[in-house]
Image (cartoon, rainbow, N blue to C red):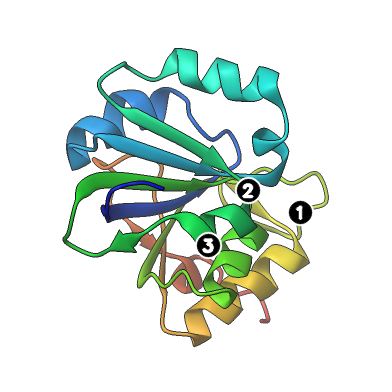
């Protein structure tokens, strides 16, 4: 479906494509492709159109649901187009991982949850389910960092929530 991709950043951001991605992450990574992996967006033409309109023309945008992403997108570390993979939810990143998309680092930039249990940072409010998903990924060998933009110092997720019983 697509040429091989060099996955430079795997990120959970429930806002998906917005200023932090466009103004900070794309230039920092020198990304020329963004893959938005979000079941709701993949099934909503309006949302998809808004995202495509926001991204500069020189950056390819692929929008798909989690199952399509895992089955059809070829990805390799260090090979192909510099790519940012954006998940809309921690659960989607876990589902992709469980179904074969392997990554060693996960950046959590913005997660807002009305039923949050833990406020990790002002931009990361996680529910109990989110914490279970992050713990699963950590136990599978994924390093979890909290960082909105590249100039911020990354915060290790488990250091940020050390006082919370896992």
Q: Circle 2 — which element?
A: loop
Question: In this view of the protein, which residue sits in the foreground, 139 or 97?
Answer: 97
Can residue 162 be seen from the camera position used here? no
Of the numbered discs 2 and 3, the one sitting upstream in the chain is 2
Q: Circle 1 — which element?
A: loop
Question: How dense is the environment of label 3, judged by Cα within 10 Å: few (below 14), some, or many (20 and up)?
Answer: many
Dot 1 corresponds to which residue?
116
Of the numbered discs 3 and 1, the one sitting upstream in the chain is 3
The reply to whether discs 1 and 2 touch (Cβ–Cβ < 8 Å) is: no
| Alpha-carbon span between mark 3 and mark 1 | 28 Å
Percent x, y of residue 77: 23, 65
Question: In this view of the protein, which residue sits in the foreground, 54 or 109?
Answer: 54
Percent x, y of residue 94: 59, 68
Residue visible at 62% across and 44% down?
A: 38
Question: How dense is the environment of label 1, judged by Cα within 10 Å: few (below 14), some, or many (20 and up)?
Answer: some
Percent x, y of residue 163: 60, 75
Can residue 56 be seen from the camera position used here? yes
């Amino acid at each position: 479906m697509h040429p091989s991709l060099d996955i430079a950043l795997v990120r959970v951001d429930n806002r998906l494509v917005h200023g932090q991605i466009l103004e900070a992450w794309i230039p920092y990574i020198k990304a020329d492709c963004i893959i938005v992996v979000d079941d709701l967006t993949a099934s909503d033409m309006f949302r998809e159109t808004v995202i495509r309109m926001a991204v500069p023309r020189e950056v390819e945008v692929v929008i798909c649901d989690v199952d399509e992403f895992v089955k059809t997108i070829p990805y390799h570390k260090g090979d192909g187009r510099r790519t940012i993979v954006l998940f809309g939810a921690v659960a989607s990143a876990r589902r992709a991982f469980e179904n074969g998309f392997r990554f060693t680092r996960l950046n959590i930039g913005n997660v807002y949850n009305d039923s949050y249990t833990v406020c990790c940072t002002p931009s990361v409010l996680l529910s109990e389910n989110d914490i279970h998903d992050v713990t699963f990924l950590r136990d599978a060998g994924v390093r979890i960092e909290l960082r909105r933009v590249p100039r911020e110092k990354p915060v290790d997720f488990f250091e940020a929530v050390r006082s919370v019983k896992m």
